[in-house]
């Protein structure tokens, strides 16, 4: 299994160099005080002021630090050393107190001894995890009693469609229900700037069904407070999607055929 994670970490180390200067991430805007959080997250997670927040798979921490600006005491975790180095540099430049830990989340208990009011994750992260049951256990471990887990994530149903065809038709190409072996892709670009080429690297992904995500969380004793689905996403997931006036990517003519994002909030009993 390490070969998959090692390859993915190598890929994400390479992505950092492209992402840090992209308009998509807008580091310059963040340093001027702009937030990178999705409006859905801010609306649904409500007040984080004075609360401790653990951000799993934080990339280079802009969302983590955006929560700090809303009053949270934050720790961000990512397996990419390049991402964590950049996160710490940005925190220093922005005069923020965010802490960052480089770790595969499955090994996080060996590197972090703290409980949190909130565990947060969002935006294209759980596809990089092979063992969702262990993911649920990690979330439970780091939450205080009464603590909240919140996720805003791309919907696994949206991942089943052909993402290379220019034809404005939803064509099933990838599995929704997935086994232990990952899907592999050769990547030479990244969503933040699809036209900028990178060295081609192999990526390994696992698609996790909604039922599996919910069952994993309830199995460790979390109580689901809400589960929401959205017919739009925050990036051009399919070549024929269009950006609407709200900056959301939707199907042509705004047809709400399938979900492309979801959010879920759960409480540790």
Image (cartoon, helix red, strand yellow):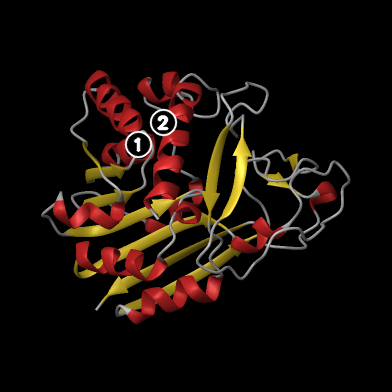
Q: Is residue 257 left or right of residue 120?
A: right
- Helix, strand or loop under label 2: helix
For the image, the number of numbered tags is: 2
194 and 81: which is toward the camera: 81
Residue 23: percent from the left, percent from the top?
Answer: 55, 23
- Helix, strand or loop under label 1: loop
Q: Are marks 2 and 1 in contact (CB under 8 Å)?
A: yes
Q: Where's the C terminus, which quadrant?
A: bottom left
Going 59% across and 60% down the picture, which residue do you hit?
A: 155
- In the rendered view, tell whether residue 169 sits above or below residue 16: below
Residue 214: percent from the left, percent from the top?
Answer: 46, 75
Graded by Cα atoms within 10 Å as few (under 14), some (14 to 19) or many (20 or more), the crowding at tag 2 reads some
Going 42% across and 28% down the picture, which residue do you hit?
A: 34
Going 42% across and 34% down the picture, which residue do you hit?
A: 10
Q: Which image quadrant is residue 203 in? A: top right
Going from N to C along the chain, the mark reached first, 2 or 1, is 2
Going 83% across and 44% down the picture, which residue do you hit?
A: 165
Residue 49: percent from the left, percent from the top?
Answer: 23, 49
Q: Which image quadrant is residue 228 in? A: bottom right
- Residue closest to the far left: 113
Residue bearing the label numbered 1:
80
Q: Where's the N terminus, which quadrant?
A: bottom left
29 and 175: which is toward the camera: 175
């Amino acid at each position: 299994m390490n070969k998959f994670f090692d390859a993915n970490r190598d890929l994400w180390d390479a992505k950092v160099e492209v992402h840090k200067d992209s308009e998509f991430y807008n580091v310059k805007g963040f340093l001027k005080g702009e937030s990178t959080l999705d409006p859905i997250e801010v609306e649904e997670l409500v007040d984080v002021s004075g609360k401790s927040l653990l951000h799993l798979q934080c990339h280079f921490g802009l969302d983590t630090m955006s929560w700090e600006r809303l009053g949270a005491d934050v720790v961000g975790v990512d397996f990419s050393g390049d991402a964590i180095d950049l996160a710490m540099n940005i925190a220093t430049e922005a005069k923020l107190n965010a802490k960052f830990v480089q770790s595969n989340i499955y090994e996080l208990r060996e590197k972090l001894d703290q409980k949190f009011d909130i565990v947060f994750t969002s935006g294209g992260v759980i596809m990089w995890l092979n063992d969702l049951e262990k993911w649920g256990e990690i979330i439970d471990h780091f939450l205080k009693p009464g603590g909240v887990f919140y996720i805003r994530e791309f919907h696994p149903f949206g991942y089943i469609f052909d993402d290379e065809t220019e034809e404005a038709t939803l064509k099933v190409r990838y599995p929704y229900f997935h086994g232990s072996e990952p899907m592999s892709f050769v990547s030479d670009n990244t969503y933040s700037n699809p036209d900028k080429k990178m060295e081609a690297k192999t990526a390994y992904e696992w698609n996790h069904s909604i039922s599996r995500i919910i069952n994993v969380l309830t199995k460790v004793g979390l109580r689901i407070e809400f589960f929401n689905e959205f017919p739009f996403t925050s990036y051009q997931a399919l070549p024929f999607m269009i950006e609407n006036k709200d900056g959301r990517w939707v199907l042509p003519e705004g047809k709400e055929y399938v979900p492309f994002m979801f959010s879920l909030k759960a409480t540790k009993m």
